[in-house]
């Protein structure tokens, strides 16, 4: 192993001129391992051409002594050699760590969403989710809240129950149509449970608790899903619901018409206490001759025709209603002795009216009572209304029972054909010596002094009235038939309407404009009811067109006989409040919040009134 190499050693025979004698000399004295390192070092440091390594390898293999040592050095040199830049292999690019982290996170999130969605669908097939509500928050929200507000709240269990119950009712109908009686029975049972729970909650005025609602919601949801999953597809449900909605609309319309008819009948009826008072007073009038003598004595009073006094006209057959109008006007007047009331009624109520107003004190105001039958000049040859009353077809239309309940009952109300109702158009003929009057309906209550009305300047107009065109339905086109050329050629459909009930009439101007003749003209043109349907307001709008002076709205506030939401401030500042509508204050169906306005002027201490109320 330590034998000396000769000069022909393979590591020394090279064709490279960079290998010198010193290097060869040194290598001869080195051991095997050292010779390998030296040989490699020489190759690297002296930059021996790499093609000579192959030649050296072949020579070294011939030397049995140096073959093992130098061959190892040559192989190591081959491994450590560097290629030129142009011949190097391209470096493989790797993804950075954060990209791998994001990919892993996306995979985990996608898997989680898949699992959650799969579980949600499985739960959905069993029951619908119950709205989770924090009991503390729910109590805070529903404190001081009525049950209607709770049902309207999107966060309440009551609303969930109500909506599920509505859907369940629809499926009950569909199940019955498909002869699935067992499912219909199950749904009906749950609906009854819902109704019972809602009823209990309404009575105790507390919100429904989660413990009460969740079992019913879960069980009802399961049944609803069962109905949906059975054979009631969306198309079937929509068609069935559409047909039932149409049926419900028809029933609702029929109920509305029926309620309107009943309201009209109730408004036309006379309460028993009023009939009792009329009978007692009429009996008193017939038995006590002194009352009749007193009436005859006051009939010729000069105050009745004195234009320096304040004259009011009331035409009615309702004793208590007229009494309230007179009492309220006198109570709010600064000088009641300067007031004169002209009352016209029919022959049946004439005695009762006389007995009442002659037997009570009205603070010195003059009161005249007349019977319409005494106006002999008001006959069929003069008045179209009287002629209509005598016409057989008109009487059949207005006074016979209706074969069809769906027909508009208000259009056939006989009160609109009553002479007392139309008597307002004959005031200049009834009181030929008067110059200005205030007309009052029997369903009004006076709250302010009305004497300033007589000093208002009407600017040459005949009628002073409060306009009602703040609402769109109170314009001319809502009252009159503008498809008739007789109307459309002479009137503006957008003209503002006004109200009867509290009106200032300039009788001098009335006679000058011949308003009564205009009224007759339009009544004669409307025999077939082609210009308007009913009432005295349409002919008044025609006869007084262009002759009406608008008054301040505070003089006359309407709607207390049908509108339950009139502003209290408007009522308090009103000079006259009008109970127009079916809910008259003397009827049981009157609106409670307004009734005290009327009752405070009723003489409830009267003996007959107390007896009739108790009886």
Image: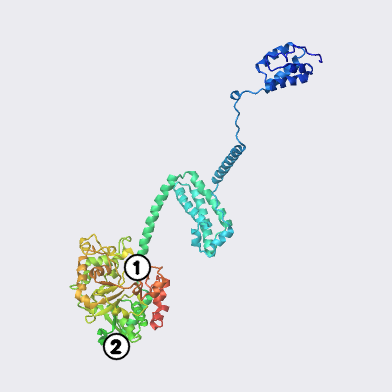
Closer to the camera in the image, 57 or 605: 57
Q: What residue is drawn where x is 50% and y is 62%?
A: 147
Location of residue 315 with respect to 126 vertically, above or below = below
Tell me if residue 297 can be seen. Answer: yes
Location of residue 268 with respect to 330 vertically, above or below = above
Closer to the camera in the image, 318 or 207: 207
Closer to the camera in the image, 48 or 241: 48
Q: Say which residue label 1 marks.
A: 265
Q: Assess disc 2: are there few (<14), some (14-19) or many (≥20) residues with their C-alpha within 10 Å of its C-alpha.
A: few
Q: Left or right: 573 with respect to 53? A: left
Residue 270: horizontal and vertical position, in percent? 35, 73
Q: What residue is drawn where x is 55% and y is 59%?
A: 208
Image quadrant of residue 588? bottom left
Q: Left or right: 478 with respect to 607? A: left
Image quadrant holding the C terminus, namely bottom left
Question: Are the residues at dot 1 and dot 2 in contact (C-beta closer than 8 Å)?
Answer: no
Q: Assess disc 1: are there few (<14), some (14-19) or many (≥20) residues with their C-alpha within 10 Å of its C-alpha.
A: some
Closer to the camera in the image, 248 or 535: 535
Q: Say which residue label 2 marks.
A: 294
Tell me if residue 301 can be seen. Answer: no
SS at circle 2:
helix
Image quadrant holding the N terminus, namely top right
Q: Left or right: 107 with respect to 21? A: left
Residue 585: horizontal and vertical position, in percent? 38, 73
Q: CA distance from mark 1 to mark 2?
A: 38 Å
Image quadrant of residue 272? bottom left
Location of residue 437 with respect to 9 vertically, above or below = below
Q: Who comes first in sequence, dot 1 or dot 2?
A: 1
């Amino acid at each position: 192993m330590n034998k000396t190499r000769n000069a022909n050693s393979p590591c020394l025979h090279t064709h490279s001129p960079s290998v010198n004698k010193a290097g060869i000399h040194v290598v001869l004295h080195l051991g095997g391992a050292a010779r390998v390192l030296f040989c490699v070092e020489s190759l690297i440091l002296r930059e021996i051409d790499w093609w000579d390594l192959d030649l050296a390898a072949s020579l070294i293999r011939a030397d049995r002594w140096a073959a093992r040592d130098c061959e190892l050095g040559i192989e190591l040199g081959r491994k450590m050699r560097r290629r030129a830049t142009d011949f190097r292999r391209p470096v493989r690019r790797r993804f950075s760590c954060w990209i791998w982290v994001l990919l892993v996170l996306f995979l985990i999130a996608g898997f989680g969403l898949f699992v959650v969605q799969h579980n949600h669908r499985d739960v959905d097939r069993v029951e619908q989710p119950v709205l989770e509500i924090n009991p503390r928050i729910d109590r805070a929200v529903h404190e001081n809240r009525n049950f209607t507000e709770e049902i309207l709240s999107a966060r309440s269990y009551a609303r969930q129950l109500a909506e599920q119950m509505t859907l369940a009712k629809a499926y009950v109908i569909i199940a019955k149509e498909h002869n699935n009686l067992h499912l219909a029975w199950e749904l009906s049972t749950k609906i009854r449970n819902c109704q019972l729970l809602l009823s209990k909650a309404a009575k105790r005025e507390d919100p429904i608790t989660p413990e009460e609602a969740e079992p019913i919601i879960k069980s009802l949801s399961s049944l609803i899903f069962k109905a949906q999953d059975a054979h009631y597809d969306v198309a079937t449900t929509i068609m069935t619901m559409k047909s039932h909605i149409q049926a419900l609309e028809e029933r609702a319309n029929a109920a509305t018409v029926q309620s309107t008819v009943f309201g009209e009948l109730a408004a036309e009826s006379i309460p028993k206490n009023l009939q009792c008072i009329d009978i007692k007073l009429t009996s008193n009038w017939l038995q006590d001759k002194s009352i009749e003598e007193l009436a005859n004595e006051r009939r010729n009073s000069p105050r009745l025709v004195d234009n320096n006094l304040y004259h009011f006209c009331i035409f009615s057959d309702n004793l208590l209603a007229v009494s309230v109008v007179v009492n309220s006007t006198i109570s709010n007047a600064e000088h009641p002795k300067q007031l004169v009331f002209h009352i016209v009624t029919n022959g049946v109520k004439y005695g009762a009216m006389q007995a009442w107003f002659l037997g009570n004190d009205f603070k010195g105001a003059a009161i005249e009572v007349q019977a319409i039958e005494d106006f002999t000049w008001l006959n069929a040859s003069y008045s179209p209304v009287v002629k209509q009353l005598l016409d057989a077809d008109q009487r059949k239309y207005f006074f016979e029972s209706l074969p069809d309940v769906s027909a508009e009952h208000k259009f056939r109300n006989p009160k609109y054909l009553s002479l007392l109702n139309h008597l307002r158009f004959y005031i200049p003929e009834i009181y030929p010596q008067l110059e200005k009057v205030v007309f009052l309906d029997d369903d009004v209550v006076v709250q302010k002094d009305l004497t300033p009305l007589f000093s208002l300047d009407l600017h040459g107009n005949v009628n002073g009235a409060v306009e009602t065109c703040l609402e769109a339905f109170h314009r001319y086109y809502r009252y009159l038939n503008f498809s008739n050329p007789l109307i459309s050629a002479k009137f503006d459909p957008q003209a503002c309407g006004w109200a009867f009930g509290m009106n200032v009439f300039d009788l001098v101007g009335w006679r000058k404009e011949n308003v009564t003749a205009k009224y007759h003209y339009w009544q004669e043109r409307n025999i077939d009811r082609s210009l308007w349907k009913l009432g005295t307001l349409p002919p008044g709008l025609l006869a007084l067109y262009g002759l009406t002076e608008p008054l301040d709205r505070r003089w006359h506030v309407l709607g207390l006989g049908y509108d339950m939401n009139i502003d209290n401030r408007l009522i308090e500042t009103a000079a006259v409040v009008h109970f127009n509508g079916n809910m008259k204050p003397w009827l049981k169906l009157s609106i409670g919040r307004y009734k005290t306005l009327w009752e405070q002027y009723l003489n409830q201490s009267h003996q007959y009134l107390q007896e009739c109320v108790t009886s």
